[in-house]
Image (spheres, rainbow, N blue to C red):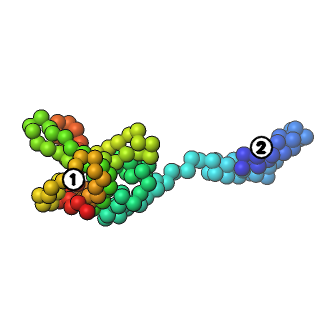
């Protein structure tokens, strides 16, 4: 469109160089072209793409390590969009004891190079003896998040071990 405008501008300039007065018809063409260029080159409103709704269940155990790790990281960044979803995950069992002496269990999710890891904490729906730490487990539970001491934590509640 800019090329068209420049060509018309050059033509109009050439015509006006040949005659001392611009005819009303030439002026109308110039104004029409200017209006078209103005309308065409006005910044278009950026359309905000609609977010695709997430499924009710996410099976992280069937995803590649990179996608699985990225999804868990997204859960930490934007936990509200995963709230109440059924999440299934597979990885090594890990545990830690907090300052109050309470044990916390997690399924570890690593990226493809195994240089980065994130634990997805879980609470079993019923008491069950857990395997040795580091054993590969598959957990499925309901995603929830909470804030404690200004930190966001994610958790699979009512989890079952498959």
Q: Is residue 73 left or right of residue 84?
A: right
Q: Is residue 70 left or right of residue 119?
A: right
**Picture quarter containing residue 88?**
bottom left
Q: Position of residue 21 (x, y in %)?
A: 83, 41
The residue depicted at 21 percent of the width and 44 percent of the height is 95
1 or 2: tag closer to the N-terminus: 2
Q: Quadrant of the C terminus?
A: bottom left
The residue depicted at 35 percent of the width and 61 percent of the height is 59
Residue that numbered label 1 is attached to: 131
Q: Is residue 35 visible?
A: no
For the residue pair 38 and 74, the one nearer the viewer reads as: 74
SS at mark 2 in the image? helix
Task: Tally the numbered discs.
Answer: 2
> Nearer the viewer's eye, disc 1 or disc 2?
1
Q: Residue furthest front?
A: 132
For the residue pair 92 and 23, the one nearer the viewer reads as: 92
Q: Is residue 48 left or right of residue 11?
A: left
For the residue pair 21 and 150, the one nearer the viewer reads as: 150
Marks 1 and 2, how far apart in space?
76 Å
Q: Position of residue 18 (x, y in %)?
A: 90, 40
Q: In the displayed structure, would residue 12 be above or below residue 128?
A: above
Q: Residue furthest right?
A: 18
The residue depicted at 59 percent of the width and 47 percent of the height is 42
Local crowd size for mark 1, using a 10 Å CA cut-off: few (<14), some (14–19), many (≥20): few
Q: Position of residue 9 (x, y in %)?
A: 78, 43
Residue that numbered label 2 is attached to: 6
For the residue pair 65 and 56, the one nearer the viewer reads as: 65
């Amino acid at each position: 469109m800019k090329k068209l405008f420049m060509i018309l501008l050059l033509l109009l300039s050439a015509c006006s160089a040949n005659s001392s007065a611009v005819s009303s018809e030439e002026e109308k063409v110039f104004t029409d072209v200017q209006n078209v260029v103005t309308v065409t080159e006005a910044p278009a409103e950026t359309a905000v793409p609609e977010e695709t709704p997430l499924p009710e269940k996410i099976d992280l155990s069937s995803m590649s390590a990179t996608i699985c790790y990225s999804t868990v990281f997204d859960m930490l960044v934007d936990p509200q969009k995963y709230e109440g979803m059924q999440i299934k995950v597979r990885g090594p069992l890990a545990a830690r004891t907090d300052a109050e002496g309470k044990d916390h269990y997690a399924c570890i999710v690593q990226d493809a190079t195994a240089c980065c890891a994130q634990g997805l904490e879980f609470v079993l729906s019923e008491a069950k003896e857990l395997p040795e730490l580091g054993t590969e487990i598959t957990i499925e539970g309901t995603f929830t998040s909470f804030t404690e001491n200004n930190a966001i934590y994610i958790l699979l509640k009512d989890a079952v071990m498959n």
